[in-house]
Each structure stands twice: as structure tokens, then as C-alpha cells.
């Protein structure tokens, strides 16, 4: 039997300071555990529940989006910029979102200005239920129990909801605004297309940063260092774009939703798209968690504390490798 020290140096990333230091054997362990955790943690069922709360949060979230956007710009411009995301998001999602935005933006300008604070507060409070559901889901992913009191949890959910809305405004401005600027400057069609690509790329980077922030602040645990959340965030961003495009293509060649669900087909499409989005995000969080679980190094911002004092399950423990090594058994073995 090998000693604990030998195992920590066995070429599987047990002393990795960053995910990039984990070798291929270590990544094999990580991906195998993610595969098993997908069913063990019932991620598909958790994603379905979070999607339901997300659907309930969409419409107050749109109200908050328009209220914040209207403080600085003409709220009708937000509709144009959301429509600029066509091709990336399913058409029914864009129609549902922009349809609600039109109703809100068509209110008298005075009501948007005078009641902005009240509207924003009410909308954020209503929209936070989706963020709270996601916080609960990420607690499951990181093997944590909610230990924060109700006031702290509420404040965090409100802050994350506000950050999410501001991030979406930023993504919309980048993805749709940059090609508009290129066109306004009289650029050629090719240059406008390049501008659209630049805008989408910048929006994707902002989206990745927002997802990383959700992984860092949403779970009830000591915060991980940024480098331990960016891998999952990058994977989520790539696969979310691919998943959204694939779902859009499927809807373009299939009328099964409208034929099956009739007038509520658009709502079902939105709910399905939310389910895909949240499921991918939970898998990304599981990858982050298993990466931390792979190393014995302190992955939290607490410094270099010993295991058991770091305030996070995946940081306070180290996973068995593919060979099913048990540290306790090794240390008690007289050989």
C-alpha cells in the first residue's frame, strides 16, 4: 500500500494549485465523478425545479431589466437590442421576452421615472425566487447545507439578482450595440458582420464572468479562489451557446411544440430553454466542485488552512481516485 504522501504526488493533481496543474489522469477522475454525480445528485430533477422558479422570475425580471435600462437609455432601445440576439436565442424566447418588454416600455415615461425605485424593488424581490432556487441547487452541487441566516441569504439573492440583470444588460449592449455602432459609422456589410462577431464574443466573456461570480458567491461555503470557478464557467458558456443554437435549429425545423401545446407552446419553449440553461450551469458547477475535490491544496480565499478548517466540503476533503484509494485505510495499514 502506498503512503498518503505518495498518493498526494501520484500524478493525479493532488497538489494542484490551479485546475491547469491537474494532469490527464486527474481529469479522468474528475469527469468520472461528474458523470456519477449527475445521477447521484439528481441534477436533472433539480434543474427542472429551478427552471419552474426561473419561469416565475422571468416576467418580474424583465420589469427590473426595463426599469434599470430606462434610467439611462430609451427603454424601447432595449427591445431592439434583444432582437439583435436572434439566431442565438430561440425565437419564441425572444418573442416572449420582447413582448413583455413592449408592454412595460409603452408605459408613460413619467411612470417609469417616478416609480422606478418602487418598480425596481418590487421586481427584484419577485425575481429573486429564481436566484434563490439556483443558490439551493448549487448548494447540492457543492455538497453544502445552507448555513446562512435568512437575512443574509435574502440579501445575497437580491444582490445576485441585481448583478444578473445588470450583466444581461451589458451582454445585450455588447452583442447588439457594437454592430449598430459599426453600421452607424457607415461600415460595409462585412465590417458590420465582424462587429457582430466582436460584440457576441465580448458578450460571451461578460456572461462567463457572471457565471463564475454565481459559482463563487451563491453556495453556502467559504468562497473559492477565482481560478477554481472559471473552468466550469468557460465550459458552461461554450456549451450554453451550442445548446441554445441547437435548440433554435430544432425549433426551426419542428412544429412539435405548437402542435402539441397549442397556445401555450411559447411558454413551454421558454421553460425548456431555461431547463437546458440551468442543467448546463449545474454540470459546470459540478465540474468546479470535483476539480476542488481532486486537490489537497486550499482552494478557498482563506489562505493556506489545513483540511477541516477551510469552510467548504470539497476543500476540506480529497476524493478517491479511479483506483479507489482510501487514505484512512492506507494510514492505518502497518505495511
Image (cartoon, helix red, strand yellow):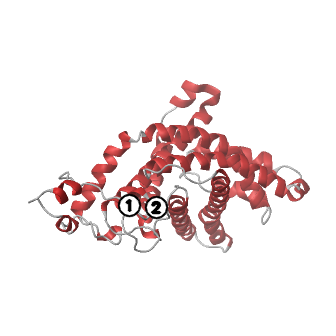
Residue drawn at x 29%, y 71% as measured from the top left: 21
Please state the horizontal and vertical placement of residue 319, each as a whole percent of the image.
29, 55
Q: Quadrant of residue 232?
A: bottom left
Contact flag, marks 1 and 2 (Cβ < 8 Å): yes
**Considering the image in quadrants, where does the C terminus appear?**
bottom left
**Considering the image in quadrants, where does the N terminus appear?**
bottom left
Residue drawn at x 38%, y 60% as measured from the top left: 316
Helix, strand or loop under label 2: loop
Camera-side residue: 163 or 228?
Answer: 228
Residue 308 disc label: none
Residue 98 visible to the viewer: no
Find the residue positioned furthest to the left: 335
Q: Seen in the image, is 44 located left or right of residue 182?
A: left
Residue drawn at x 66%, y 44% as measured from the top left: 57
Q: Seen in the image, is 123 located left or right of residue 209?
A: right
Number of residue marks: 2
Camera-side residue: 51 or 186?
Answer: 51
Residue 30 visible to the viewer: yes
Residue drawn at x 69%, y 49% as measured from the top left: 61
Q: CA distance from mark 1 to mark 2?
A: 7 Å
Q: Seen in the image, is 148 located left or right of residue 295?
A: right
Camera-side residue: 33 or 75?
Answer: 33
Please state the horizontal and vertical placement of residue 49, each as a whole percent of the image.
54, 38
Residue 311 disc label: 2
Task: Identify whether 21 is placed above or below 76.
Answer: below
Q: Earlier in the sequence, mark 1 or mark 2?
A: 2
Q: Residues within 10 Å of mark 1 (few under 14, many from 20)?
A: many
Residue 316 disc label: 1
Task: Identify whether 111 is placed above or below 44.
Answer: below
Helix, strand or loop under label 1: helix
Amino acid at each position: 500500500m502506498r503512503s498518503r504522501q505518495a498518493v498526494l504526488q501520484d500524478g493525479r493533481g493532488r497538489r494542484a494549485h490551479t485546475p491547469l496543474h491537474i494532469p490527464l489522469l486527474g481529469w479522468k477522475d474528475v469527469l468520472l465523478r461528474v458523470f456519477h454525480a449527475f445521477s447521484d445528485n439528481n441534477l436533472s430533477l433539480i434543474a427542472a425545479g429551478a427552471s419552474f422558479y426561473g419561469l416565475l422570475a422571468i416576467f418580474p425580471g424583465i420589469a427590473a431589466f426595463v426599469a434599470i435600462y430606462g434610467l439611462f437609455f430609451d427603454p424601447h432601445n432595449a427591445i431592439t437590442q434583444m432582437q439583435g440576439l436572434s439566431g442565438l436565442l430561440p425565437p419564441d424566447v425572444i418573442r416572449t421576452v420582447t413582448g413583455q418588454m413592449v408592454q412595460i416600455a409603452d408605459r408613460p415615461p413619467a411612470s417609469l421615472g417616478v416609480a422606478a425605485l418602487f418598480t425596481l424593488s418590487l421586481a427584484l424581490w419577485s425575481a429573486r425566487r429564481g436566484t434563490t432556487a439556483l443558490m439551493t441547487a448549487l448548494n447540492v452541487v457543492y455538497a453544502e447545507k445552507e448555513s446562512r441566516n435568512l437575512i443574509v441569504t435574502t440579501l445575497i439573492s437580491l444582490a445576485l439578482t441585481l448583478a444578473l440583470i445588470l450583466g444581461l444588460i451589458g451582454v445585450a449592449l455588447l452583442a447588439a450595440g457594437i454592430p449598430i455602432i459599426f453600421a452607424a459609422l457607415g461600415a460595409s456589410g462585412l465590417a458590420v458582420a465582424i462587429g457582430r462577431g466582436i460584440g457576441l464574443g465580448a458578450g460571451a466573456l461578460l456572461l462567463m464572468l457572471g457565471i463564475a461570480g454565481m459559482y463563487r458567491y451563491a453556495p453556502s461555503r467559504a468562497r473559492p479562489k477565482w481560478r477554481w470557478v472559471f473552468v466550469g464557467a468557460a465550459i458552461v458558456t461554450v456549451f450554453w451557446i451550442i445548446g441554445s443554437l441547437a435548440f433554435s435549429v430544432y425549433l426551426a425545423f419542428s412544429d412539435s411544440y405548437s402542435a402539441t401545446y397549442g397556445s401555450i407552446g411559447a411558454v413551454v419553449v421558454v421553460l425548456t430553454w431555461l431547463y437546458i440553461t440551468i442543467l448546463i450551469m449545474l454540470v459546470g458547477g459540478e465540474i468546479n466542485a470535483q476539480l476542488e475535490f481532486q486537490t489537497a491544496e486550499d482552494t478557498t480565499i482563506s489562505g493556506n488552512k489545513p483540511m477541516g478548517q477551510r469552510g467548504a466540503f470539497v476543500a476540506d476533503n480529497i476524493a478517491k481516485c479511479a483506483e479507489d484509494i482510501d487514505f484512512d485505510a492506507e494510514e492505518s495499514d502497518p505495511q
